[in-house]
Amino acid sequence: INYYIYYAKNTIMKYIFYFLGTVLLLGQEKPKPEATEYWEPEPVVVTPAQDNLPPSDAIVLFDGSDLSKWRNARGGGEASWIINDNGSMTVTRNGGIETIDEHGSIQLHIEWRTPTKMEGKGQGRGNSGIIFQRRYEVQILDSYNNRTYSNGQAASIYKQYAPLVNASKPPGEWQSYDIIFTEPEFDKIGIMTKRGRFTVFHNGILVQNNVEILGTTEYIGMPKIGKNEISGYMGKNTKKNLYIQDHGNPVEFRNIWMRKL
Ligand code: MG
């Protein structure tokens, strides 16, 4: 009989427990979709433009009219690349050009084309490059049926990362880069505490997916990571300007704009 009493007690307790649990659950507030919304801060309104033209908050670096945002990167004199009637400019053998202002983390849009008349091969055909903060180069090259080392072809992070795919158009056709550059961070004594990063779209195709920049671009040897170290082929300048390379080929550029990040 003791067993039956024990059993009955237990069963009653069990149902009381279930009942209390149900009451508790019903009494609780139901989670609402609003609980995971946030409204502040509201993203700033930016007006996109048609046909790849700059959005409303962009800093226009070149729109075909003049080179006032640029200077010669060797002596600091006037940028003397040729401005063409079609809204583009052409590299001349006067050395690279750089922006007058330095830059931090940016989104960059730039359009370029290599000469229709194919001259040279490998690194010698349609070579230029965009060098961020005078240290980190995204390669420009005619890589349409023009083999070279993979981490030196168009849209490579030069000598560091090959592009994921070769999205090159034939020489003489306009191509675009949309690049997100995140600058590296350094501590007070100049040691890198956070690597920089590149994401690159070549003609709208993802070719560099948030890769870690290993250090300065070097033609020979390993990248450098000190705050005041500069790329081996960039001269003795520790400034952080955006630089376009003169590699001896008449590459054209147009529609260059950036947005600060
Ligand atoms: Mg180059």
Image: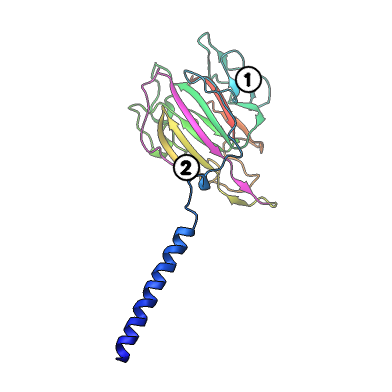
Give the residue pinned by disc 1: 79
Amino acid marked by disc 1: Ala
Residue at the image point whose x is 44% and y is 32% from the top: 201
**Quarter of the image where the C terminus is located:** top right
Badge 2 marks a residue whose secondary structure is strand
Segment colored magenta: 160-187
Residue closest to the eye, 8 or 164: 8
Bin the neighbour count of mark 2 within 10 Å (Cα to Cα): few under 14, some 14-19, many 20 and up: some
Residue at the image point whose x is 62% and y is 47% from the top: 185
- By secondary structure, the bulk of the magenta-drawn segment is best described as loop
Amino acid marked by disc 2: Asn
Residue extending furthest right? Answer: 188
- Horizontal and vertical percent position of residue 96: 58, 26
Q: Which mark is residue 210?
A: 2
- Horizontal and vertical percent position of residue 136: 54, 38
Residue 159 highlighted magenta (yes or no)? no
Badge 1 marks a residue whose secondary structure is loop
Q: Is residue 213 above or below residue 50?
A: below
* Comparing labels 2 and 1, the label whose residue is closer to the camera: 2
Residue closest to the eye, 153 or 19: 19
On the rendered structure, is 31 left or right of 182? left
- Horizontal and vertical percent position of residue 227: 64, 46
